[in-house]
Image: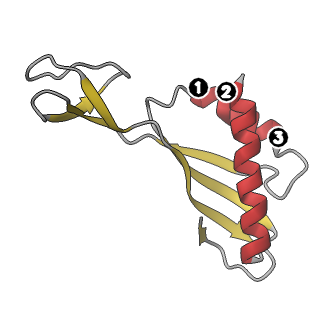
Amino acid sequence: MHEVSLAREILRILQEQARMQGFGRVHRVHLELGPLSCVDPEALIFAFEAVTADTLARGARLELHRPPARGTCRHCGHGYTMDSLVTPCPRCGGPGRILSGLEMRVRDLEVSGGHAGTSREG
């Protein structure tokens, strides 16, 4: 289950930001997760809860934002929404090139404690 490794990486980012920005507690993490990222959202939330149990993010809510995946046709250049890694062009049937949808990034945080206010962007 690679979601545990991903949850550990999110925690590492939170700890690094806490050191840099001076906050002591994370209440909410807004995570952008591309629909083509091959990550199981429920498994990621479960893993996040497990790896943050005794940390500054204990009890924090992981909120997933799932923007649509976008691609462009390698033959005709048409831009379109992709449903999978190999979604063909709806215009000509040509192969697509993924423009977005694979990403996973911490978009922003809600934090408290230390020198921080109630909200910080990450």
Q: Which mark is residue 51?
A: 3
To which residue does mark 1 refer? 40
Q: Which residue does the image show at 17% across and 23% down from the upper left?
A: 89
Q: Residue furthest right?
A: 54
Q: Is residue 36 visible?
A: yes
Q: Is residue 45 above or below residue 95?
A: below
> Mark 1, residues whose alpha carbon is within 10 Å: few (<14), some, or many (≥20)?
few
C-alpha span from label 3 to label 2: 12 Å
To which residue does mark 2 refer? 43
Instruction: Specify the quadrant that holds the N terminus.
Output: top right
> Mark 2, residues whose alpha carbon is within 10 Å: few (<14), some, or many (≥20)?
some
| Whether label 3 touches label 2, CB < 8 Å | no
Q: Which residue does the image show at 82% across and 69% down from the upper left?
A: 24
| Whether label 1 touches label 2, CB < 8 Å | yes
SS for dot 2: helix
SS for dot 3: helix
Q: Position of residue 30 (x, y in %)?
A: 56, 53
Q: Residue furthest front?
A: 75
Q: Position of residue 2 (x, y in %)?
A: 70, 27
Q: Which residue does the image show at 77% across and 77% down from the upper left?
A: 22
Q: Which residue does the image show at 67% across and 27% down from the upper left?
A: 43
Q: Is residue 74 above or below residue 100?
A: above
Q: Position of residue 118 (x, y in %)?
A: 65, 74
